[in-house]
Amino acid sequence: MIEVEQLHARAGEFSIRDVTLTVPRGCYGVLMGRTGSGKTTLLEAICGLRQIVSGRIRIGGRDITHLKPGERGIGLVPQDLALFPTMTVREHLAFALEIRREPRQAIEDRVDELAGLLGIAHLLDRGTAGLSGGESQRIALGRALAFRPGVLLLDEPLSALDETTREEMHALLREVQRSTRVTTLHVTHSRAEARALAEKLFLVENATVREAALQELSA
Amino acid sequence: MNHAPTATPPAAHRPGPDWPFILGLGLLSSVYIILIVAMLVADATFTTPGHLLHALASPEIRFSVRLSLLSCTLTTLLSLWVSVPTAYLMSRFRFPGRRLMDAVLDIPIVLPPLVVGISLLILFQTPVGKMIERLIPITYALPSVVIAQFAVACAFSVRTMLVTFDQISPRREIVALTLGCNRSQAFWRVAFPEARRGMLTAATLAWARSLGEFGPILVFSGATRFRTEVLPTTVFLELSVGNLEAAVAVSLLMILAALAVLGIARVFGLRAPLERVL
């Protein structure tokens, strides 16, 4: 569960104020808003990458407002994906587990499991150069899910994809959500994407957030 | 306003030809290129293989080749060891005094080399300097050669690494933080491997600068044969006794080493930093 209470966070000159939202455990929340409305700032604040002025963030009931990014147990798929150009796909999937010093066998099992779930088993020993947009998305997703985070945050991950690949990714995201039950907050400005994925809808307006009914998407 | 075609079209405008401008660019740039190549050709044609072999047979010159190779390599390692963290600090963190630090790092690049030598000489005359000298002899001894080279070469290395880290997006390190890394792990696992090519460029630059370092070494280390004589010192000593053949032969050795290093930097390193730093 993601609970944000009266959050005031700052990114340089820009800030979001009085943001309150709750994504229940295992739910797929979609956050919509115009470009520059503060969606990314909110996501980065939840990850611990932005200065929190006031308010509170809880993940699964635990107050994480002032924890370091790595202590929060949040998987992030940023808009630019930020894949590591010096690593193979396998190393991407193993990264968070190696940092946590998991046993080698456990890491190998998890990498195989993720590669199967995401359909990237044939890419494991490749580098990131020359991957297609959809493949890169899957790897960024796998890297974020590897350490079994309680929460997955997606920042407009599908905006650079063509229509067909995007629909494939919608199906994949639903499948990931169904099999992992990870609480998800997905930022997008696409109504079609929100319609395809949202179980709960939030709209960012005037630097704050309100929950909206799913019916508003078809309006 | 009426833009309908008129019966008499306006007089056609014809821009003048481009060739005089391009020819001018070509002529002016070729003057410099010809000067550089002519210098190298003059050295190469002045020297015979006999001169080179004769120079290399001299024990003094063999000592100076060895000292040059050793001191340049030590300086390069030291420069990387200092410049990588310095540049990373400046590229990734905003802190009070950062602009001042940036300006101070330019000083060795603009300072006249002789002044670097004098300043080092004076530094080791201060009480702290004298204390260090009592533990390890520095001035006019081998460590002074490395310190004199390091004082200048490291600044070039820092500049190269700064451009390198500025070109690497910090986003990937930020993602690494969310995946459980601390700052140090994000640096070693994500940023450091990405900076490899920049480090190679920084190393070759530092090595080449050190190889040619003369003024500070002359002042701070002296020109004692079998003690502090590096290749530029050899050229100076041979010239001062009128042995032009040996001076040119040793110069040619340095030219070959510099070209080799330039080749390595061009093929394996980053091109942009080299162009921006030099």
Image (cartoon, coloured by chain):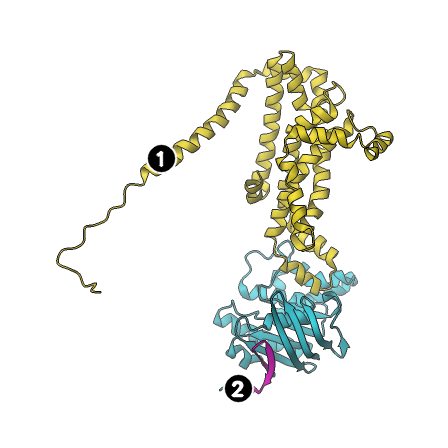
- Residue A113 image position (x, y, % from top left): 69, 69
Residue type at mark 2?
Glu
For disc 1, the marked residue is: B23
Q: Chain of mark 1?
A: B
Identify which residue is drawn at 57% across, 56% down: A129
Mark 2 vs mark 1, CA separation in Å = 66 Å
* Number of marks in picture: 2
Q: Are marks 2 and 1 in contact (CB under 8 Å)?
A: no
Residue lying at the far left in this picture: please name it: B7
For disc 2, the marked residue is: A216
The region drawn magenta spans A201-216
Query: Chain B takes which shade in the image?
Result: yellow
Query: Chain A takes which shade in the image?
Result: cyan
In this rendering, the answer to whether A132 lies above or below B34 is below
Residue A137, located in which quarter of the rendered image?
Answer: bottom right
Q: Chain of mark 2?
A: A
- Pair 2/1: label in front: 1
